[in-house]
Image (tube, grey):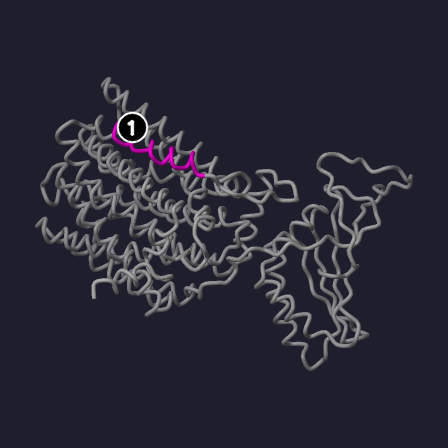
Amino acid sequence: MTEQPKRSLFAADGVAAPLRYAVFRRIWLASLLSNLGLLIQGVGAAWAMTQMTTSADMVALVQTALMLPIMLISMPAGAVADMYDRRIVALVSLSIALVGATALSVLAWLGLVTPQILLIFCFIVGSGMALFGPAWQSSVTEQVPAETLPSAVALNGISYNIARSFGPAIGGIVVATAGAVAAFAANAVLYIPLLVVLFLWRRTTEPSRLPRERLNRAIVSGVRYIANSPSIRIVLARTLVTGVIGGSVSALMPLVARDLLHGGAQTYGIMLGAFGMGAVIGALNITAVRKRMNGEAAVRACTLSMAGAIAAVALSREPVLTAAALVIAGAVWMLAVALFNIGVQLSAPRWVAGRSLAAFQASIAGGIAIGSWGWGRLTDAAGVETALLVSAALMFASPLLGLWLRMPPVGARNEDAEVLADPEVRLPLTGRSGPLVVEIEYRVDQESARAFHNVMQEVQLSRQRNGAYGWSIARDIADPELWTERYHCPTWLDYLRQRNRTTQSERALHQRAIDFHLGPDPIRVRRMLERPFGSVRWKEDTPDRAANEVLPVATAAGSST
């Protein structure tokens, strides 16, 4: 009788299933301590700011200082996570946060902290965590199998919100008894277990046969992938809007505790703890919500519930009622953010997972950072209650976005790309040779022309996601059955990457296009090196076999596009 709940909890789709894997379990437990320290520091920083200034704007800027780095450097951080060993990236980023927290502790102990210094070091700690986030989240796919990935995402949210449940309350006690310096020092100490666990993790990697991209090209590749993925674009837009509106709760919580509830640091900690407790409840139920509701319905229910909870926080003057409303707000906030996060993780292939998650982090953190600044300005002008009521009204109206930006079904691109042999080449090429022009000829029955053209619009996005540009589809006016797909790649190396980034679901899409082809002969593929005037070397010389040269493997011509 008592075993059945345990079995269901640890089933493949149970929220605790990823904890069966030792690497994930150790990193998860250590991240719980790290999150606990970060929340304790957050309490200390916010409360220290209320003691140094009466400006609501400056108090709200503490949240902005912690979140703004995520918006500013997430995409470079995601590119770094995809290019280098994610374990090393995580260790370096945690070291940055540790240095920032340690320096802030020392300055606070010496009594040298001013509002400006506090914001600067909050920004440094936030920068370390901004670099850490994509490397940590994208490495989850290396710690657990794909079927438990949604549960692993939910568990990571639970880790943060367990810390949110207890960290603020502990932080309030620490600040009340030992001052902000103790809160800053606690954060520094609690980074150490995660550093140790990551240092001991023996991550297995398969080295790529292609050279890694330069940072600027990797960033461009990530932006291009997202720009050509309609489902990810929609999720990021909805995430940004939810962050801007919902950021009022975390940004104004110190003022809710001080001005509406007339409490101190402990009250502030308890209110944050109530929000975090609700978030844990929400994360524990993410699997059930995903089974019962589609993405749009779930997000709509979450935002409407949060609107009511924010309004209750604005109108309540009783700590018990405010805490109850914050439990609800925390649960639906966590559900909405987890739904967005899962949607991005399961829609992006591994080669761009860090950059896709970085874009997600930039959306949620940028939304909170921008919103925190705006809610602080509105509070200075109209008061805490009015600002929260405006936030509730906007949150209530936000489901209308679903009329234009409906949450898409979760994609199926989170699979490894199949490595293809390189095409036959008889012209001396280096990795920098280019641009490369690819032409693919299809012969399609005229009655199927419209259906073929519709499929090719999806093929266009697939090619452009993975690195192609200048894509076009043309129909021969003298031979209406003949269609020519044409696109460019900047260099030969970019073309090899473009071929090997295509996932199984994208190859199935390409096969749908090929299935329209008529006749016994296969589709015809031409790969041509585009040469501007004056660039052709007429002299037959030996190609420079530089370190960055990519020598192709000869295979049957036209074996793949």
Around disc 1, counting alpha carbons within 10 Å, would you say few (fewer than 14), some (14 to 19), or many (20 or more)?
A: many
Front residue of 156/540: it is: 156
Q: Does residue 116 appear to the left or right of 543 in the view shown?
A: left
Q: Residue at x 32, y 50 (%)?
A: 157
Q: Is residue 406 above or below residue 479?
A: above
Answer whether residue 190 is magenta in the image. Answer: yes
Q: Is residue 199 above or below residue 531?
A: above
Q: Main secondary structure of the magenta part?
A: helix
Helix, strand or loop at label 1? It is helix
Q: Count how many numbered circles sit on residues in the image.
A: 1
Q: Quadrant of the C terminus?
A: bottom right
Q: Quadrant of the N terminus?
A: bottom left
Quarter holding residue 189: top left
Q: Which residues are magenta?
A: 185-201
Residue farthest bottom in this picture: 447
Residue 161 in the image: state x and y as whole percent.
27, 48
Q: Is residue 282 above or below residue 453?
A: above
Q: Does residue 257 appear to the left or right of 149 in the view shown?
A: left
Residue 524 in the image: state x and y as whole percent.
78, 65
Q: Which residue is mark 1?
A: 118
Please, what is the three-letter code of the amino acid marked with disc 1? Leu
Front residue of 457/35: it is: 35
Q: Residue at x 75, y 76 (%)?
A: 518
Residue 499 in the image: state x and y as whole percent.
66, 54
Residue 411 in the image: state x and y as whole percent.
48, 63
